[in-house]
Amino acid sequence: MAKINSKNRCKTIFGLVAILLFSLSLVPASFAVKENKVIIYQNEACGHCLPYLLELNNFLIDAGFKIEDKEVINNVENRKELIAFIEKNQIPRELQGHMMIVINDNLILQGHVPIKLLEEYLLKYPTFDFPYTIIYQDSMEIESAKTYRVMNEKKEVADCDITQTIAECQQNSKKQEFVSKSLFLFVLINGLLAGIHPCTISVLLFFIAFLFTIRKSKSKIFAVGAAFITGVFIAYFFIGLGLFKAVVFSTSPHLAAKIGALLITALGLFNLLSYFMHDKVKLSLGLPKFIKPKIIELIHNASVPAALIVGILVGICSFGCTAGIYISILGLLLTKATYAKGFAYLLMYNILFILPLIAILLASSNKAVIERMERLEASEKRWIKLIAGIVMLIMAAIIAYIAW
């Protein structure tokens, strides 16, 4: 009887074990313990990489990651694997560092990413289920690094200050994507708005009217007017080129946009003040008084060289009226555009800037039209200041939102 009970007991235990094993086989894979792994594709000859890797390895091991080192310079198979990974994930060349670290397949570090940034990011994702993210910081001197870049799964790239967390940097990508998509339209609108400039327009109208008065031919009027516009273009373009190079070599292109936004705000408030207090205070950002006699003297000369010089002088002296717009555009260009693309946008901006002057020159064949435009410019100048002030404050708000 005892033997029978023992045999039944064994069968019962065996049956329970079988049921348990069968039940475990039905448990979804998501409940299985996931292995957190890191693959480091490195060059063993990189002396500067060793101290960083030692610190990084200790940090990742403490966090519970299993690390695998793969040397890619002398090991052909590892190099092929790295190239295949880059091609599969479509990692842009500008985001490829001297060393690549892949964490759980989705978090990709390029170069020497500060460990403090990783600590903050791991706290945000305690189960290490990272969204697809590339973090690029290729300077070996981490202490002196000022910025880094982040690309998300939508291929949106954000350039951020090294003091910002990765999460904050990813939030900036939305702003920078907005800049990237609207940059052409932004440059187009601002170039035309800046071109509707009382300083340059009033001088050109006076120039053309004077040439009609001294009975110059239409071809002479066109040649002199074209020389004046060329002079304005030369002045603005070369001022912009100098500022553009200064922004290129700046450690923070956003700083230029921020300064520009403040200048536009000041200029917008100045225009509004000029409109509302025109009876009490005479405010003007026009040509300086000391330069006006020289310009009038050159205008009376009525030659092409004289007109070119007048254009350059007017361009230089009236630059203060649009400096904020110019500096803001340059700052925004450098946050998303390459140098070549930024140069092309700068050229386009200046061509758009002189388009209103070209339109006036093309209408200069009719003396009555020019006289009407002169009267209109003089009578509506106050309203132009009101509109310009409002538009500038709106622009300043948009640029400040992007830059900050």
Image (cartoon, grey):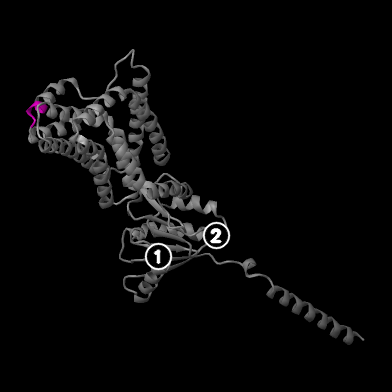
Q: Quadrant of residue 5?
A: bottom right
Q: Considering only vertical position in the picture, is 107 above or below 88? A: above
Q: Within the magenta stretch, is there residue 235?
A: no
Q: Which mark is residue 90?
A: 1
| Amino acid type, callout 2 | Asp
Could you tell me if residue 159 is visible in this image?
no
Residue name at image x 27 percent, y 26 percent: 377
Could you tell me if residue 323 is visible in this image?
yes
Q: Considering only vertical position in the picture, is 330 above or below 11? A: above
> What percent of the width, then of the height, locates residue 395?
38, 36
Question: Which mark sits nearer the N-terminus, 2 or 1?
Answer: 1
* Separation (CA) of disc 2 from disc 1: 21 Å
> What percent of the width, then of the height, locates residue 225?
15, 35
Residue bearing mark 2: 129
Q: Residue furthest right?
A: 1
| Amino acid type, callout 1 | Gln
Q: Secondary structure at mark 1?
A: loop
Q: Within the magenta stretch, is there residue 301?
A: yes
Which residues are drawn in magenta? 298-302
Q: Quadrant of residue 356?
A: top left
Residue name at image x 32 percent, y 24 percent: 380
Residue name at image x 18 percent, y 27 percent: 206
